[in-house]
Image (spheres, helix red, strand yellow):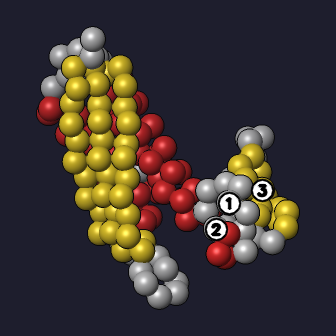
Amino acid sequence: MKVRIKWIENVSFVGESESGHAIVMDGALEGGGRNLGPRPMETVLMGTGGCTAYDVVHILRKSRAPVTDCVVEIDAERAPEDPKVFTRIHFHFIVAGKGLKAQQVERAVHLSAEKYCSASIMLAKTAEITHDFEIREAE
């Protein structure tokens, strides 16, 4: 896997992926940025959320669970001193479907956290990672 990061100005950068996609990252005004995009560490959390959501949906669909929606809300804390690594990350899954069973969702979240999500498993080296979920009945 390869990516390319190009400095634009001040603390603005464009990240380009090998798959042909780009994202703008920027700093806050007080850090010399223009607030043109998410901070680099925010993109780490978004990527991790995407990784684990992908796993959960994939596992549920593979087991023929009637999943229709999946949202992951992530709350994280970082160390106060450099390097400001993540020290705590909580994943809250909101999964919807017709007749989804808690056991199915719990299994999918557990498998993602313990076996499949490379990003969250990597971040667990510095952060305490917790998960919970809620199920919403689809209309």
Q: Which residue is mark 2?
A: 28
Q: Position of residue 133 (x, y in %)?
A: 23, 41
Say left or right for 132 vs 83: left
- Kindly check if marks 1 and 2 are in contact, taking CB atoms under 8 A apart as contact: yes
- What is the three-letter code of the residue carrying label 2? Ala
Choose top left, top right, bottom left or bottom right for residue 32.
Answer: bottom right
Q: Which residue is mark 1?
A: 35
Does the rendering let one see residue 60?
yes
Q: Position of residue 66 (x, y in %)?
A: 28, 17
- What is the three-letter code of the residue carrying label 3? Val
Choose top left, top right, bottom left or bottom right for residue 105.
Answer: top left
Say left or right for 81 vs 3: left
Q: What residue is shown at x 33% (from left), y 69% (from top)?
A: 88
Q: Whole-Å distance between the Cαs marked 1 and 3?
A: 13 Å
Q: Quadrant of the C terminus?
A: top left
Lower sequence index among marks 1 and 3: 3
Say left or right for 69 vs 13: left
